[in-house]
Amino acid sequence: MLREKLRDFDALLSMVSDRVDCDLIRRVSNRLRIVANMAVGYDNIDVKCATQYGIYVTNTPDVLTEATADLAFALLLAVARRIVEGDHFVRWGEWWRSGTAFHPSMLLGVELYGKTIGVIGMGRIGRAVARRARGFGLKVIYYSRRRLSEEDEKALGAEYVDLETLLARSDFISIHVPLTNETRHMINEERLRRVKRGAIIINTSRGAVIDTKALVRALEEGWIAGAGLDVYEEEPLNPNHPLTRFKNVVLTPHIGSATRETRLAMAMLAVENLIAFAMGREPPTLVNKEVLAVRPPGFIY
């Protein structure tokens, strides 16, 4: 559908669900000049191929940082304190049928205060999660491709460790890395077996960063205590997927940036990129800067 329609357009404002692969790019390269992706990630676009054909690729970073960090923490709290289970317990009448208003062992969860959170990927969103973690009295450790400066580490109260140490020490793990060849299935069965027993994993980055089959096995066999997921290897998620069986897993439908303020800001930034390009200027959030040497910005044929 996209392939047929795109033949008649010079620009594409794409969603993360739109697959802009090299085959599509080749077919429309005689006319298409820019892809403005309304997302911070751009793994749905073959950027290298786009560059070869002189097609500009832009994204929408920064504007969704706080909203996504909010959701990561919401998922963490929901899993740790069994919020969704508690809602169902009340809503489906189980609490009423129990006849017990309070019981010392009813829906016991785990506290955040004094625990350790491991942040994988200390970019904008990772740092925003770390700031929130300090407010909850969590110790922050992190692993990232690029280590922060000492000043930034001190400001965040964050300790740099290697990935294996993070997995072994963290009570909670929050993932914030882009999907690349290096990060695909970064959290695989081998690494899930190294995770601290009783840990909770949160993923608001990209689904394929975690090997889903390995995650299901980890949940079935109790290697981890639970998970909060906003992203999946296949989206939308089939309601019969094995992940939907677990009470200790909270699932949301890729809504990390889903606030009115953020979605408006994302749309506006995508449009700003398109307007700048149309006026012959470098788009403000150009992903493939190498394309400047292939073709100048603007609808020039």
Image (tube, rainbow, N blue to C red):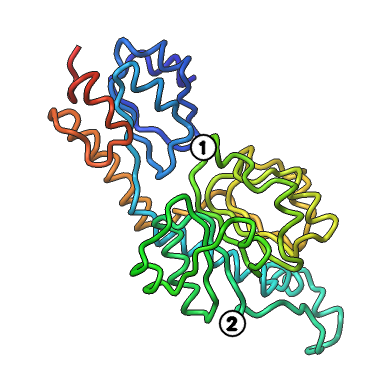
Position in image of residue 104 (x %, y %): 80, 89
Residue drawn at (40%, 62%) of the image: 66
Position in image of residue 50 (x %, y %): 37, 22
> 83 left or right of 123?
right
The foreground one among 226 and 293 is 293
Lower sequence index among marks 2 and 1:
2
Compared with residue 16, is residue 63 higher up or lower down, i.e. above or below? below
Residue position for label 1:
180
Position in image of residue 38 (x %, y %): 38, 40
Kindly report the distance in space between the C-alpha atoms of the residues bearing marks 2 and 1: 33 Å
Q: Quadrant of residue 293?
A: top left
Residue drawn at (57%, 64%) of the image: 118
The foreground one among 144 and 22 is 144
> 33 left or right of 170?
left
Q: Secondary structure at mark 1?
A: loop
Residue drawn at (52%, 71%) of the image: 140
Q: Which mark is residue 113?
A: 2
